[in-house]
Image (cartoon, rainbow, N blue to C red):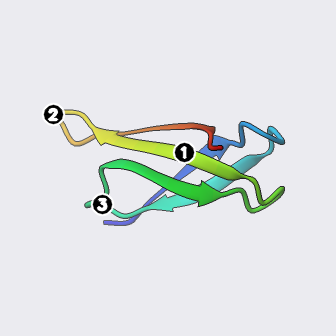
């Protein structure tokens, strides 16, 4: 099961769709497809398996 989710870049504020592998959990770094600045992406799943994604600025 592949999951695509729309997030907003914390730098340029553009909405971008990102793909999250079903087994991914924890933190990863990803670059914005629009402005190329780095994000910290935090991926979690609740007890029912629902995806929770937060995006913040990476230094």
Q: Residue at x 80, y 44 (%)?
A: 14
Counting from the top left corner in percent of width and height, residue 36 is at 78, 60
Q: Where, by quadrant of the figure, is residue 22 drawn?
A: bottom left
Where residue 9 sits: x, y (%)?
Answer: 72, 42
* Mark 2 Cα-neighbour bin, 10 Å: few <14, some 14–19, many ≥20: few
Q: Are marks 3 and 2 in contact (CB under 8 Å)?
A: no
Give the SS element for disc 1.
Answer: strand
Identify the residue under disc 2: 47
Screen quadrant of the C terminus: top right
Query: Residue drawn at (80%, 38%), measured in percent from left and top?
Result: 13
Mark 3, residue position: 22
Q: Which residue position is annotated with label 1?
A: 40
Q: Secondary structure at mark 2?
A: loop
Helix, strand or loop status at disc 3: loop
The number of callouts visible is: 3
Horizontal side of 34 relative to 31 (left or right) equals: right
Which residue is depicted at the point 50% across and 46% down? 41
Rendering coords of residue 48 (x, y %): 18, 36
Marks 2 and 1, the one that precedes in the sequence: 1
């Amino acid at each position: 099961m592949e999951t695509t989710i729309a997030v907003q870049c914390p730098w340029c504020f553009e909405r971008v769709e990102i793909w999250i592998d079903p087994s991914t959990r924890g933190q990863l770094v990803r670059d914005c497809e629009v402005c190329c600045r780095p994000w910290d992406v935090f991926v979690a799943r609740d007890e029912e398996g629902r995806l929770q994604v937060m995006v913040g600025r990476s230094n």
